[in-house]
Image (cartoon, helix red, strand yellow):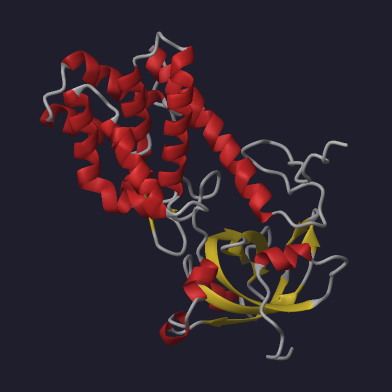
């Protein structure tokens, strides 16, 4: 293969038609990497490679020439890849023929990291400024102080943390974007549900996923931290809310209700909830969270869609493919 091959993004690779066997070159991040063992006892790698435009999975067997290089690079490694386009069950799954880790000097090339790291489509500075207005909108003094105290502790990390490893808003500033979208929905829907305490609902939304600032780590590839594995973001977020609620002298009833929102927002125990939602505010927040998580998957899929395909690949969070073609203009 020639070094003269143009570098293709993941979106460009997925947009290729009838491309099986076509040579390509790309610079990609190892998003995920797992070492598994085949039935014959030999190890193999299952990995996701990606850039800011998308990702794809592939499998590397230990008898291949690139196995050791990719294994040594690990999650977060940046690689120049040459291979041939291939597909598995209708999904892009290229054959990797040559892999070269990028040096620190190469990683410093202008624009390289920007091309590799997916970010929220809305400017982070504008999102953060809007976020402050939602904190200010909480009229109950101790509740507002509780929320502000949490973000005085975690604010810088919260600004860039993704909302997930892969499911929804799984990119830089994704957690901030997800929380802002929920707060906007909360503000719009509160007039319909007078039974919901507005201050508790808004505080619960702003705090519900704050544990993810501790659960996740990594700059180019996101993975769960030790605390994230041992405790999870629901418990970690509960601890933050409780710590600052006590510090702000929030009354016992509101603190209990706020803690319950954080503990129950995942909806179902199999999805990570500590308990089922059992207050009007907790039900309200959990439903908005589920709505924005799923619509976040839709929005990201539409952003990454190419003009040739009518449907996306199957999305785990929706348990379905997604129709990506827009509605035809009215005649």
Q: Is 126 above or below relative to 44?
A: above
Which residue occupies 45% across, 85% down? 103
Q: Nearer the viewer, residue 251 or 189?
A: 189
Which residue occupies 68% across, 58% down? 39
Q: Is 108 above or below relative to 275?
A: below
- In the picture, measured across the screen, residue 322 lies left or right of residue 224, that is right
Q: Looking at the rendering, in which quadrant would you find the C terminus?
A: top right
Q: Quadrant of residue 11?
A: bottom right
Q: Is 250 above or below relative to 62?
A: above
Q: Residue furthest top?
A: 195
Q: Nearer the viewer, residue 302 or 86?
A: 302
How far across and down, in percent of the image, does residue 5 sit?
72, 85
Q: Nearer the viewer, residue 172 or 90?
A: 172
Which residue occupies 32% across, 37% down? 133
Q: Quadrant of residue 40?
A: bottom right
How far across and down, in percent of the image, does residue 115 sit?
54, 70
- In the picture, measured across the screen, residue 9 lies left or right of residue 21, that is left
């Amino acid at each position: 293969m020639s070094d003269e091959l143009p570098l293709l993004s993941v979106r460009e690779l997925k947009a290729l038609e009838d491309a099986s066997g076509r040579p390509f070159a790309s610079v990609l991040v190892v998003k995920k990497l797992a070492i598994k063992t085949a039935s014959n006892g030999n190890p193999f790698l299952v990995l996701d490679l990606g850039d800011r435009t998308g990702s794809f999975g592939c499998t590397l067997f230990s008898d291949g020439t690139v196995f050791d290089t990719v294994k040594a690079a690990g999650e977060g490694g940046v690689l120049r890849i040459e291979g041939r386009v291939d597909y598995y069950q209708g999904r892009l799954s290229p054959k990797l023929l040559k892999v070269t880790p990028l040096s620190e000097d190469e990683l410093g090339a202008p624009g390289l990291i920007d091309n590799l790291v997916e970010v929220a489509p809305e400017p982070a500075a504008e999102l953060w400024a809007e976020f402050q207005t939602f904190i200010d909108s909480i009229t109950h003094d101790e509740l507002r102080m509780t929320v502000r105290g949490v973000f005085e502790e975690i604010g810088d990390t919260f600004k860039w943390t993704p909302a997930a490893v892969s499911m929804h808003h799984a990119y830089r500033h994704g957690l901030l974007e997800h929380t802002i979208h929920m707060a906007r929905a909360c503000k719009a829907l509160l007039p319909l549900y007078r039974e919901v305490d507005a201050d508790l609902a808004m505080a619960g939304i702003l705090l519900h996923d704050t544990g993810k600032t501790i659960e996740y780590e990594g700059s180019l590839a996101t993975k769960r931290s030790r605390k994230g594995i041992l405790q999870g973001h629901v418990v970690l977020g509960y601890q933050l809310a409780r710590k600052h609620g006590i510090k702000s002298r929030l009354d016992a009833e509101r603190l209990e209700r706020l803690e319950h929102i954080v503990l129950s927002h995942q909806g179902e125990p199999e999805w990570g909830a500590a308990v089922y939602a059992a207050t009007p505010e907790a039900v309200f927040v959990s439903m908005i969270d589920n709505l924005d998580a799923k619509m976040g998957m839709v929005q990201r899929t539409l952003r990454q869609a190419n003009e040739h395909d009518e449907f996306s690949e199957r999305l785990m969070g929706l348990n379905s493919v997604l129709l990506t073609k827009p509605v035809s203009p009215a005649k």
